[in-house]
Amino acid sequence: MYLAMNRFKVALGKEFAFEQIWKNRETNLKNVNGFIEFHLIKGSTTDTYTIYALHSTWKSESDFTNWTKS
């Protein structure tokens, strides 16, 4: 199993729009070889942004790498 994480800095006041984009986007991930699941996690907030982390789980690192190159 391989775990990947990406971080995003979202400007204050734009969090709801960001979350809606992620929730309502078209995705084909469930059909990608080796993909298991992902979670969008809302983190801490500073004076200018909120941190979000995207945590994805793959069967292998090579499955993840292949997806990033597709």
Image (cartoon, rainbow, N blue to C red):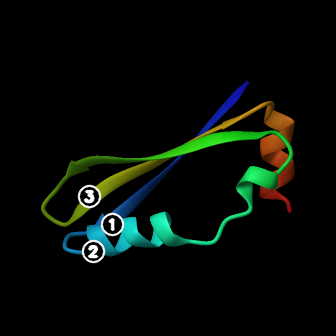
Q: Amino acid at mark 3?
A: Thr
Q: Which mark is residue 54?
A: none
Find residue 64 and report its image quarter.
Answer: top right
- The residue to which callout 1 is attached is 10
Residue shown at 17% from the left, 56% from the top: 46
Q: Decide: marks 2, 3 in contact (CB < 8 A)? A: no
Q: Which mark is residue 50?
A: 3
Q: Which mark is residue 14?
A: 2
Mark 2, Cα crowd under 10 Å, few <14 / some 14-19 / many 20+, is few
Question: Picture coordinates of residue 31 (x, y %)?
Answer: 81, 53
**Which of the two discs, 2 and 3, labels the residue nearer the N terminus?**
2
Given this view, does label 1 or label 2 mark the residue nearer the observer? 2
Q: CA distance from mark 2 to mark 3?
A: 9 Å
Mark 3, Cα crowd under 10 Å, few <14 / some 14-19 / many 20+, is some
Task: Answer left or right for 44 relative to 18.
Answer: left
Q: Decide: marks 1, 2 in contact (CB < 8 A)? A: yes
Which residue occupies the foreground of this view, 22 or 2? 22
Q: Amino acid at mark 2?
A: Lys
**Which of the two discs, 1 and 3, labels the residue nearer the N terminus?**
1
Find residue 50 and report its image quarter.
Answer: bottom left
Q: Decide: marks 1, 3 in contact (CB < 8 A)? A: yes
Q: Is residue 5 above or below residue 23?
A: above
Residue shown at 50% from the left, 71% from the top: 24
Question: Picture coordinates of residue 45 (x, y %)?
Answer: 19, 53
Q: Amino acid at mark 1?
A: Val
Q: CA distance from mark 1 to mark 3?
A: 5 Å
